[in-house]
Image (spheres, rainbow, N blue to C red):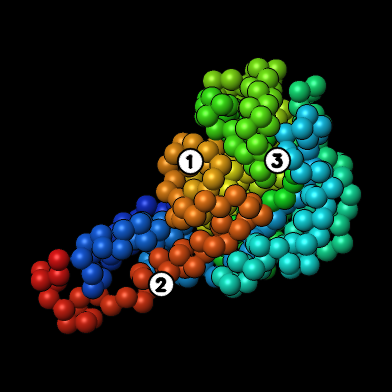
Amino acid sequence: MSLLTDTIAAITPVDRAARAQAEERQTQLTKPAGALGHLEVLGNQLAAITGQCPPPVPEPGLVCVFAGDHGIQERGVSPWPQEVTVQMAANIAQGGAGVNVLARAAGATVAVTDVGMLSPVEGCRDERIAAGTRDFLTGTAMTREQAEAAIEVGIRTAQRAADEGFRILVPGEVGIGNTTPAAALVCAFTGADPSEVTGRGAGANDEMLAHKAAVVHAALVRHQLLGGRGTDDPVGALAAVGGFEHAAITGLLLGAAARRLPVVLDGVIACSAALAAVALAPDVCGYLMSGHAGAEPAILCATHSLGLHPLLDLGLRLGEGSGGALALPIVCSAARVLREMATFSDAGVTEEHVE
């Protein structure tokens, strides 16, 4: 059996009994019922993921940034030159990017893995499968074997993180042109219209945006993925229109679920990968949290399909894992509420008078 097959087999549903215990404990805490809104839902989810009530605070966190380049960039889907991928990966590896700042503020670590950049970068873990994907309008972006290899890079990353003591993961990415395959994947897994979910990425103007949506539509037609057909063969859909970083994040989510680690999703690339991971193993969804709504329209399409509630809506479109890192303190706070907040009996508060 392959690592991918073994990992999927190891994924189990989150613990319903622990969730029920957390829901009951929420009613005993010194607050009106439901007063902490979605923070209570998060706490209950953490209990279900860990099988413990109250759940442990999910610290420390690791932002797993995967870097890759894209053949579809030859079609002019981003205003940025492709060499920026390598430059930004180097910046993240050196600690100077936005995600590094936000991760430090959250007490999290950032690690960068090269799964398919055009050139290697010092400071990045070298798991390069190829020097970029191919143009998916002329063929598949990856071979099936390459897509599976990239998924397994992500699985191994999650396994290492768990072994090293990290208790929550954030998937991040860097790759010029990667919002185009993300939009294609969201359409492939949800059946959405490319004109409605294709976004501006790193700053496409109106003309480039229209061109980008047309490229996504053409790719879906070419690879017979219209109408949500990606769910028929998730690995095949990733190979057809995805990127190495999309596939690696898919593996990261599978690996995290197999090790019962919560994952805070970032932007459109992570959300598109989440659709693939859930198509491969539906129970993965119970381990996922949505960090933010973001500026890319495909994020909300994906989170709605997954039944996730974005924790933040700050108009972010940086990627890198930045929005997920920004949401980490909220997730940790949800666990702390269940662990540290007094109950009515502890505090000597008369429950029926709290409204």
- Measured Cα–Cα span from mark 1 to mark 2: 28 Å
Q: According to the image, label 3 marks what residue? A: 178
- Residue 255 in percent (x, y) is at 63, 51
Determine the CA span between mark 2 and mark 3: 36 Å
Disc 2 marks which amino acid?
A: Arg
Question: Pointer 1: residues within 10 angstroms few (<14), some, or many (20+)?
Answer: many
Residue at left 12%, top 76%? Answer: 350
Residue found at x 49% / y 68%: 329
Cα distance in 3D space between marks 3 and 1 = 17 Å
Quadrant location of residue 59? bottom right
Query: As shown in the figure, which amino acid type bears the numbered disc 3?
Result: Asn
Q: Residue 198, image x and y in percent?
A: 59, 33
Residue that sits furthest to the right in the current view: 119
Instruction: Evaluate whether residue 75 shows in this view.
Output: yes
Residue placed most toward the observer, 247 or 156: 247
Query: Residue 345: x and y, percent?
Result: 19, 78
Residue to which mark 1 is pinned: 300
Q: Which mark is residue 195?
A: none
Between disc 2 and disc 3, the foreground one is 3
> Which residue is disc 2 drawn over?
336
In the rendered view, tell whether residue 110 sits above or below residue 193: below
Residue at (56%, 26%) from the top-left corner? 195
- The secondary structure type at the circle numbered 3 is loop
- 123 up-or-down from 291: above or below: below
Q: Is 265 positioned to the left or the right of 76 in the image?
A: left
| Mark nearer the N terminus (1 vs 2) | 1
The quarter holding residue 268 reads top right
Given the image, on which type of amino acid does mark 1 rest?
Leu
